[in-house]
Image (cartoon, rainbow, N blue to C red):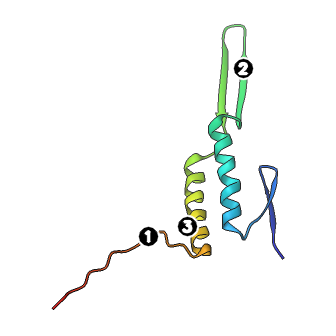
Amino acid sequence: MPVLVTINGVAVDQDDPCALYQALYAVKLRALAGEHVEELSIQSPVTREQLRFSGADVKALDAELMRLAAACSAKNGKRSRYAKTTRFVR
């Protein structure tokens, strides 16, 4: 029985690396577009300060996307690398 995880409002099977890749890639695009940005405003009689921050760790997301892409390729039978071989002819 598949275990479903909700990512970005979509239920995804956590054992399917291809579906997880698609869902997390959509999350990355939304984060890069600035949709997951929070804004905080602090105001006093002397100063006014605005802070903008995002909760997404892009490096960790990229690493997970690369891992899922490799797992998806392995699941579908596609090789990610093709090693060159050498032969000695006599």
Mark 1 and mark 3 residues within 8 Å of each other at the beta carbon: no
**Location of the C terminus (image quadrant):** bottom left
Residue name at image x 33 percent, y 75 percent: 84
Question: Element at badge 1?
Answer: loop
Residue 70's tag is 3
- Which image quadrant for residue 66? bottom right
Tell which circle, 2 or 1, labels the residue nearer the N-terminal end.
2
Front-most of residues 4 and 45: 4
Which residue sits furthest right? 1
Classify mark 2: residues with Cα within 10 Å, few (<14), some (14-19) or many (20+).
Answer: few
Which residue sits furthest front? 90
Separation (CA) of disc 2 from disc 1:
52 Å
Separation (CA) of disc 1 from disc 3:
10 Å
- Residue 85 lies, with reference to residue 47, above or below; the image says below
Residue name at image x 44 percent, y 70 percent: 81
Residue 15's tag is none
Which residue sits furthest left? 90
For label 1, the residue is: 81
Visible residue check, residue 55: no
Tell which circle, 1 or 3, labels the residue nearer the N-terminal end.
3
How many callouts does the rendering have? 3
Question: Element at badge 3?
Answer: helix
For label 2, the residue is: 42
Tell which circle, 3 or 2, labels the residue nearer the N-terminal end.
2
Front-most of residues 85 and 32: 85
In the rendering, at what x and y percent does residue 41 appear? 72, 21
In the rendering, at what x and y percent does residue 60 appear? 58, 53
Visible residue check, residue 60: yes
In the rendering, at what x and y percent does residue 56 appear? 65, 44
> Residue 88 vs residue 31: left or right?
left
Question: Element at badge 2?
Answer: strand
